[in-house]
């Protein structure tokens, strides 16, 4: 297997296959599994991994603590890859819609893999690095198909004498999120965090742990970082963060809070809000397509996507506010009279921050305007809702001094 993957330009870092599994569920465990158990994490299967949905506090309490203090999320189940070689940018731009060539020094961007019909294969973050390679993070639930895509296309590129290699990075990945992030992280750094604005990255020592890749990003809408760390040092780093300061209540946070936080922030969950049947334009992600890519095309599904940019799609993703029972994925959306189905909810939950329900979903193009009244069909009862701008809670990203 290793020889075959090397032929395809994919080099597995030692350690990826040695991660332990739960024999009863066949789910893998991240390098922080023992930390979760010690902190009372309620473990559930998620995307082939055993992950904490919550800890001893409620999901709502955990959510609000991230909004007001800081939370630590184990995101080590996500796929981390390194793309190197002098043709690495040409390679990745053959698969994604983003302008990767236009990224600045140590900058990153959210982008999407697309298929030939313009559908979204996965969403991912691509980072330029000072070390001369691309650092890529994509979803755990799409890891197999993402790796298959990368290896297959890498083989094609290499057969045409392009210089490109893809390598899985078998690191832990820790997300520290919330307004208290800087107070927690800064004491463990030898550089000023204000020099690392949103969507930039740096290789650095963190609380004595060497070779950590710090990326200022996250999935909560708050200021935050994701830290890629050697699995042997991940637990030490987590406890250093938990014990960094008494000025910030920093606690472990699970999948439940992560989902409600990202929903308040208007961020998509792959498999719910976007999939291979939705285009970036329908998903209200047109901003991920750089000006140069709009002019030149050259990405999978470009003809479909660029046509939608000009002519507008028949449906689009929007946000909703409501009271009463919350809408969940699959809930029908009807017009104000309740006589016509106009779309479907893809994600929804009670908002701990707003004390009302938030949701997102796809509706016909005639119903996109914020303030329009619609109805949700929840258990055969009509519930009033209103189209809303997203994010529901303002983003608090740090863009520099």
Image: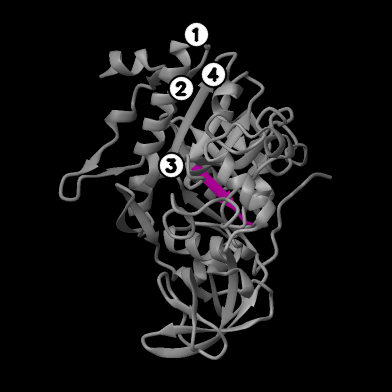
Marking on residue 166: 2
Task: Choose the circle earlier in sequence order: 1 or 4.
Answer: 4
* Disc 4 secondary structure class: strand
Q: CA distance from mark 4 to mark 3?
A: 20 Å
- Residue 176 falls inside the magenta stretch: yes
- State the residue position of label 3: 78
- State the residue position of label 1: 161
Depicted 2 relative to depicted 149: above or below = above
Q: Quadrant of the C terminus?
A: top right
Q: Is residue 392 left or right of residue 154?
A: right
* Disc 2 secondary structure class: strand
Is label 1 or label 2 in front?
Answer: 1
Task: Pick the residue in front: 140 or 212.
Answer: 140
Whether residues under marks 1 and 3 lie with C-beta atoms below 8 angstroms apart, the answer is no
Which residues make up the magenta segment? 174-178
Q: Residue furthest top?
A: 161
Q: CA distance from mark 1 to mark 3?
A: 30 Å
* Disc 3 secondary structure class: loop
How many numbered marks does the figure carry? 4
Task: Pick the residue in front: 26 or 285.
Answer: 285
Marking on residue 84: 4
Whether residues under marks 1 and 2 lie with C-beta atoms below 8 angstroms apart, the answer is no
């Amino acid at each position: 297997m290793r020889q075959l993957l090397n032929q395809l330009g994919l080099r597995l870092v030692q350690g990826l296959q040695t991660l332990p599994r739960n024999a009863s569920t066949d789910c893998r465990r991240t390098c922080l599994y023992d930390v979760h158990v010690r902190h009372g994490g309620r473990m559930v299967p998620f995307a082939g991994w055993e992950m904490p949905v919550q800890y001893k506090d409620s999901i709502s309490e955990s959510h609000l603590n991230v909004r007001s203090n800081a939370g630590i999320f184990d995101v080590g189940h996500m796929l981390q890859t390194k793309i190197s070689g002098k043709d690495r940018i040409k390679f990745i731009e053959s698969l994604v819609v983003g302008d990767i060539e236009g990224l600045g020094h140590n900058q990153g961007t959210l982008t999407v893999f697309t298929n030939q019909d313009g559908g979204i294969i996965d969403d991912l973050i691509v980072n330029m690095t000072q070390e001369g390679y691309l650092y890529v993070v994509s979803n755990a639930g799409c890891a197999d198909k993402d790796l298959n895509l990368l290896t297959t296309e890498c083989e094609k590129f290499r057969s045409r004498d392009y210089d490109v290699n893809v390598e899985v990075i078998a690191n832990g990945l820790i997300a520290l999120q919330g307004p208290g992030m800087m107070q927690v992280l800064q004491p463990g750094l030898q550089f000023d965090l204000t020099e690392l604005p949103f969507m930039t990255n740096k290789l650095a020592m963190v609380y004595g742990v060497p070779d950590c890749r710090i990326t200022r990003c996250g999935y909560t809408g708050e200021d935050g970082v994701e830290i890629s760390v050697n699995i042997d040092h991940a637990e030490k780093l987590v406890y250093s963060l938990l014990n960094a300061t008494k000025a910030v209540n920093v606690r472990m946070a699970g999948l439940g809070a992560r989902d409600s936080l990202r929903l308040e922030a208007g961020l998509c969950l792959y498999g719910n809000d976007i999939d291979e049947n939705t285009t970036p334009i329908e998903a209200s992600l047109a901003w991920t397509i750089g000006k140069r890519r709009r002019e030149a095309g050259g990405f999978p599904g470009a003809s479909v996507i660029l046509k939608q940019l000009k002519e507008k799609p028949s449906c689009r993703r929007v946000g909703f506010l409501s009271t009463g029972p919350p809408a969940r994925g699959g809930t029908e959306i009807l017009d104000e009279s309740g006589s016509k189905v106009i779309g479907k909810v893809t994600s929804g939950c009670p908002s701990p921050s707003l004390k009302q329900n938030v949701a997102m979903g796809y509706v016909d193009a005639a119903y996109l305007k914020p303030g329009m009244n619609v109805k949700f069909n929840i258990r055969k009862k009509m519930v009033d809702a209103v189209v809303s701008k997203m994010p529901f809670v303002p983003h608090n990203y740090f863009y520099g001094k």
